[in-house]
Image (cartoon, grey):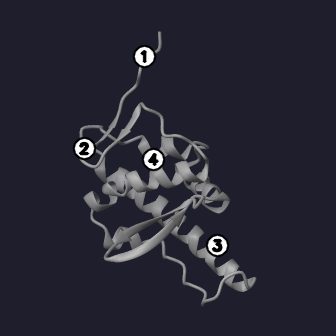
Amino acid sequence: MDKSNNITVDGRQINIIYNVNAAEELYKTSHNPNVLVWLAEYVNKDNQNLAELSSRVCKAVEVMANASVRKHNIEVSLGFRDGEKKPFYTEDYFKSVLDIFDAVNLFKDVVETIAKGINFEIPKELKIDDDYLEISASKKN
């Protein structure tokens, strides 16, 4: 099963993956072992924190895109794959080419990729659809 996802950024197809490298890097950034909680912290707070949410999504995309590049480059070095090594994305690339709403729209792709990487089903409480994002707490009796 492919645990990566292809996203389109600035007209380019970019592969992202959530593997051990990505998990370690995002933990260093978030200081939270649950990166989904860190990412979703600003979802649906009356759009007051879209800049922070988009910044977190950009960071997650950068880390996961670089994890994919790292995997590709290692496979080329070991002879498992033909081709040339790819350059890594810089820290500011995604923040430079995406506007706030483009970044927020990538939230769904990031969450789906993380879910693939940890064999995790997205809880029903985390409703993701193409029109909007909604997190709701369900009360268990």
The three-letter code of the residue at mark 2 reads: Asn
**Disc 4 to disc 2, how far (Cα)?**
15 Å
Task: Give the image quarter of residue 78.
Answer: bottom right
Q: How crowded is mark 4: few (under 14 residues within 10 Å), some or many (20 or more)?
A: many
| Residue behind mark 3 | 71
| Residue behind mark 1 | 139
| Labels 4 & 2 near each other (Cβ < 8 A) | no
| Residue behind mark 4 | 39
Q: Earlier in the sequence, mark 3 or mark 4?
A: 4
Q: For the residues carrying marks 1 and 2, which lies nearer the camera in this image?
A: 1
The three-letter code of the residue at mark 4 reads: Leu
Q: In which quarter of the image is the N terminus?
A: bottom right
Identify the residue at image location x=69%, y=78%: 74
| Residue behind mark 2 | 47
The three-letter code of the residue at mark 3 reads: Lys
- Determine whether 132 is above or below 107 in the image: above
Location of residue 77 in the rendering, given as x and y in whole percent from the top left corner = 72, 85
Helix, strand or loop for disc 4: helix
Location of residue 27 in the rendering, given as x and y in whole percent from the top left corner = 60, 52
Farthest residue to the right: give it: 78
**Disc 2 to disc 3, how far (Cα)?**
36 Å
Identify the residue at image location x=49%, y=76%: 89
